[in-house]
Structure formats: C-alpha cells, structure tokens
Amino acid sequence: MADPNSVHTLILAKKEQLAKRIKQPLAELAEMCSEIWPDQKQIDEILRHEIGAIPDCSLLYAWNVEGQVISCMILPDRIDDSWLGRDLQERPYLTKHLPYMGIMLSSVYRSDYDGRECITALQAVNRDNQLLGFVAADFSVNDMLRDSHLTASIPKWNQYRGDPAVRGTLFLQQRFTSQLDEHIDEVLSRFETLIAEHGVFHAKIHFSSGRCSIWLIDDPYSYRILTIDEILDPDLSLAYPWRQYTDMATITPAQVKACFKQFKHLRFGDETIYLRSSSINIINGMVGLTFSCDGSHYMPIQEFLDKEESFWFGNTVREVHQESQQLDQPDNTSDS
C-alpha cells in the first residue's frame, strides 16, 4: 500500500489533479487543430481563442512530429512569434516516450522561454489515425500551487544506513569519553528544563563534540548552538524567556524525560555500538538517532520508548557483521 504521506505520492496526486482538469479541454483543442493542421495562422487563432478554457495554462503552442514549433507562442495576454520554427528536440519532455494518443505530463523543469519552473502537457493531434504533431500547454508551478496547502506530516519510523567506510571499521573503534559524557545527567536535566519551561521545541545533542542545537517557539526559523560550557552554566535558564509547555506538543514532559533516559542508555550501553547524536521534537513527536556505525533512525517517540535493548544493539551488530563478511568475501569471478 502506497504511503499517502510520501513525497512520491504527493507528486502523483498533484499531477493527477492537473490531468483531470485539462484532459477534456486539451482533447477538444487537439480535435479543432487537426482539422486545419498545419496552417500556422489558423492554429494561432484557435490557440488564442481557447487558452482561457484550459485552467491555469500560461502558454500554448504547437509543434510537428519533427519537433519544430509551427505556431506562435500563445500567452493569455499576448502572442509571440519569436519561437516560430524553433527546434524542440532537446526539450526535457522530448526525452521520454511521446503520447500518440491522449496527453502526457512532463516532469517539472525550468522553461527556456520564461525561466520559470513549469510542467508541460503534451496532447497528440491526430487525423485519420495519423499522428500530425502535438499541442503543448505549459503550466507554471507557482501558479498551480498558489492556493495549495502543505500536507500534514505523519510521523513514522525510517532507517538509513551510513557510510560503508565507517561501518566497515566499526569494530576497530571504541567510544571516547567526552566532556558531555562526564556531565551527561546534568546536561540532560538542563534540556528537560529548556523544553518544559523555556520554549525549546526541538533539540539536537552531539555527544562526542559536546555541542547542542536548539530551536525555540519564539524564533522557530533559526537555531542556536550551545557549547558544553554554556550548557553546564547554572545560569543557562536566564538566557531564554519562560514559556509554558506548548499546546502544540504531541508528547508529554514525562515522555521527554523518558527519552533522555533512553538516550543515556544508548550512549553508554556498548563501547562499540553507541549513540553519537540524538534529536527530539515535541511538536511532531519524533526522535532522531545516529550511531557509531553511521546508521540513523527517525521514529515516533512512543515507538522509540517501546523498543527493547536487543533491538538497538543486537540487530545493529548482526547487520554490521553481515556487511563486513560480504565485503571480506573474495571475488570468485575470473576472466576466461
């Protein structure tokens, strides 16, 4: 089953919406053009008259099967003959299979004509079952999306493997005790306070380097970097205004506390497989984890808290061992 929240699904939905809106008017336009094809002046007149019937269309033109423009460029407010006769063989939409019947939508590309991102819909023009050419309708991405809304993100677990070079040498490395490690209880306690009482909604902790990044409700478009010395300053809270725990949070302060406890466990639970950095966002309810093997996990907080120790250490060790064995196997193929 397709993920309704994936980028691919969202793209397909937008294209399907566009195709449904323009399918009939483009088909009718192609039928009209087929009757007078390839008469340039008559094609221009039809395109000029019909461009308003195609929703959000910013440009209409026609070209033959050789890829040459045989009409003026028809815009909603003017006609431009500067591209008449131009060869379109290198246009992005000509790198794919062309529609011999019906329409085809191109991928998004930047138009050579006006410099804007656009999608081109190609409608085949036929007469007596013979392909004559195409009517091309351009749709500005900005115009298409002007009244659209961002789809809400649905938190889910994602896992990503890191650099094979790092994973291949994993068992040759060992965790180094950083200054943050030496004060980890104090550091995590400070972050609990910043989140619960000072408007921090997203925080990322780099355990080895001792630096941390925070995002605040009062200034969500910027992040602030804290050094280990700043985090350990007992007066740190004075640097940020008091804020009640945000109503936008999807997790409780108790879950935040439990997450930090688990972060500590994953940092010290194994000297080889250990947590290198972690993040928490109380609004989307997600945690991010990057381990010494350079693998990363992003998952909803409650799912993170429900995982047992064997999930983190047992599974990761097995995966890395399997990869190492595959890399160490000699290539048995030989030239004959």
Image: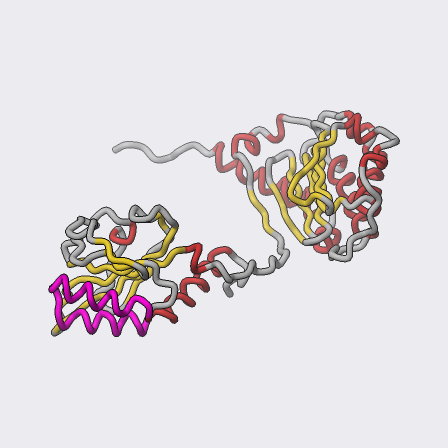
Please identify the dominant SS of the magenta region: helix
- Residue 25 falls within the magenta-colored stretch: yes
Q: Residue furthest front?
A: 77
> Is 238 above or below relative to 302?
above
**Over which residues does the magenta segment extend?**
23-52
**Going by the image, does 31 lie left or right of 236?**
left
Q: Residue at x 24, y 71 (%)?
A: 29
Q: Residue at x 51, y 62 (%)?
A: 147
> Is 247 above or below relative to 293?
below
- Residue 208 visible to an observer of this rendering: yes
- Residue 307 visible to an observer of this rendering: no
Q: Residue at x 15, y 51 (%)?
A: 85
Residue 294: horizontal and vertical position, in percent?
60, 36
Colour logic: secondary structure
**Going by the image, does 188 lie left or right of 289?**
right
Which of these two is toward me, 23 or 255? 23
**Going by the image, does 194 lie left or right of 285?**
right
Residue 250: horizontal and vertical position, in percent?
74, 57
- Residue 40 falls within the magenta-colored stretch: yes
Instruction: Report which quarter residue 121 is drawn in.
Output: bottom left
Residue 279: horizontal and vertical position, in percent?
69, 42
